[in-house]
Amino acid sequence: MKAVFGAVWGVLLAGCDGAAPTAAVEDTGPLLELFVMSQCPYGVEVENGAIPAKKKLGSAVRLAIHYIGEGDADNLQSLHGEPEIKGDIAQLCVREKEPAKFLDFVACQNENMRSVDTNWSGCAERLGIDKAALTSCLEGPEGRALAAASFKLSVERGAMGSPTMFIDGKPYNGGRKEKHFLKAWCEAITGEKPAACAEIPAPQRVDAIFFSDVRCTECDIAPVEGKLKSELGGLVVKSVDYGTEEGKALFAAMRAADPAFMLPSILLSPDVEKDKDAMEMLGRFLRPLGDYRELRLGGTHDPSGEICKNPGDEDGNGQADCADPKCAQTIACRTPSPGTLDMFVMSQCPYGAMAMMAVAEVAPLFGDEMKVNVHFIGDVEGDKLTSMHGPNEVEEDIREICATKKYAKGNQFLKYLACRSKDYQNMDWKPCAKEAGMDAGVLEACAKGEGPGLLRDSFKLAASLGIGASPTFLGNGVREFNAVAAADVQTQFCQDNPTLAGCKNALVLPKEGAAPPVPAGQCN
């Protein structure tokens, strides 16, 4: 399902995977809890929506912000590293010392979330917070104890992705803007409602056709409805299946508008353009198509052609299922390749980076018995290559795929990929080439020459296999799994190759005193 939804699904469900309530004692009413990471853009997004909503509703509602991480006070761990931990601690210290200024302090730091480890000083001055007391808490054991307690609560509540949200203990999966939190809070208030509740505008009606094919096992778009309604409060959904007369007529009309039209598809009425907030979130994924605005899901299913893994020869070409060229490249029709580990990643996805470091740690245990193939996930739009994390990610993808091509012997390329993954936002890549024993000139020449073509083919392979989440592994080329820790990669690979010598070695375990294992996650 994630592969079909592609970038749209990633935006709708976006998050960063990996103590005491903040409300003042006089606050009453429904409690909204946000479990976040201070440098996660999605966590910051919900804070920036919830804080102004809380201010409008005042003491009629409660807001609590907790922080996601692992470890005790002596060994705190967070997805975005030590700067994020310091930002978490700064906010927790303000909550402890001057709770009335806590939300304003968080909002101030969120103006530049990448600098939460340093901008606390300026925010404290702006808000008149006692800097001496804040510094003492931030730099001493008190702050680390507060962070450890908040991290412990996040683990107890199962909050591993930022944001994880609850209203009065029940999961909240609604929209993330101020108006969404206002609406959710106002609906949860049982007594007299604040005046702000009466000022919430009625949502814009938007008609939607959820167009799919029950024969397609990867075309279930029903789960998108709830998330889409969180952005479009006036969404009215009608489901249409290709197998009906209406479905065949609609498909013909869409193919007339775009001969490359595929399923599944979500077709919205033009009224969606009247919802400015929704357009801010979804506009880049919409395109005019006939009388509709199609939400591009990246569908690859042609209901008029061969249906893979479905008995019969639907397109009448005398070749069914895996014998049909259309199905030959799907995972189900691939021929197993023993000793092969295929990894599909985005070079600047934090989970993809962790996975590449893990593979670099595991591969030496197997030597020539493990063949590692690294592929990249992105989109091809005409002559342009795009990726979730922007142009810099495409540039690094090209260098890394050049490394896999030019330095394949002995999996040497893994040394470069692992080095870059340790600091993937640093665009100075040449020190990693030197560390990996590579000629930077060779990588540069490839990047300017055949590299973009190699990446284009890699993107197309991932798309043809329906893989859109980083990291995704294929054991022996056919069994899909996800892992980000070395021990998990080794275990999964040995599940398909139990007789290899590398599987007889002790599993790769964290060194004593090392960070606890990071839960598996994906960018999609």
Image (spheres, grey):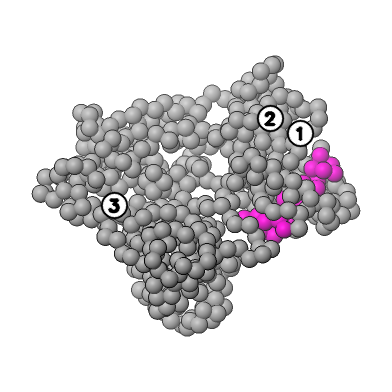
Residue position for label 1: 23
What stretch of residues is rendered in magenta? 75-99
Secondary structure beneath label 3: helix
Query: Does 206 appear in magenta?
Result: no
Please give left or right for residue 76 compared with residue 134 in the image. left
Identify which residue is drawn at 84% across, 56% down. 140
Q: Nearer the viewer, residue 9 or 404?
A: 404
Identify which residue is drawn at 44% across, 48% down. 7
Contact between marks 2 and 1 (CB within 8 A): the answer is yes
Secondary structure beneath label 2: strand
Identify which residue is drawn at 48% across, 72% down. 365
Work out whether residue 40 can be spotted: yes
Identify which residue is drawn at 55% across, 72% down. 419
User: Could you tell me residue 142's position as x and y percent?
Assistant: 83, 51
The kind of secondary structure the magenta stretch mainly shows is: helix
Answer with mark 2 or mark 3, whichever residue precedes in sequence: 2
Please give left or right for residue 222 compared with residue 98 in the image. left
Residue position for label 3: 332
User: Could you tell me residue 45's position as x and y percent?
Assistant: 61, 44
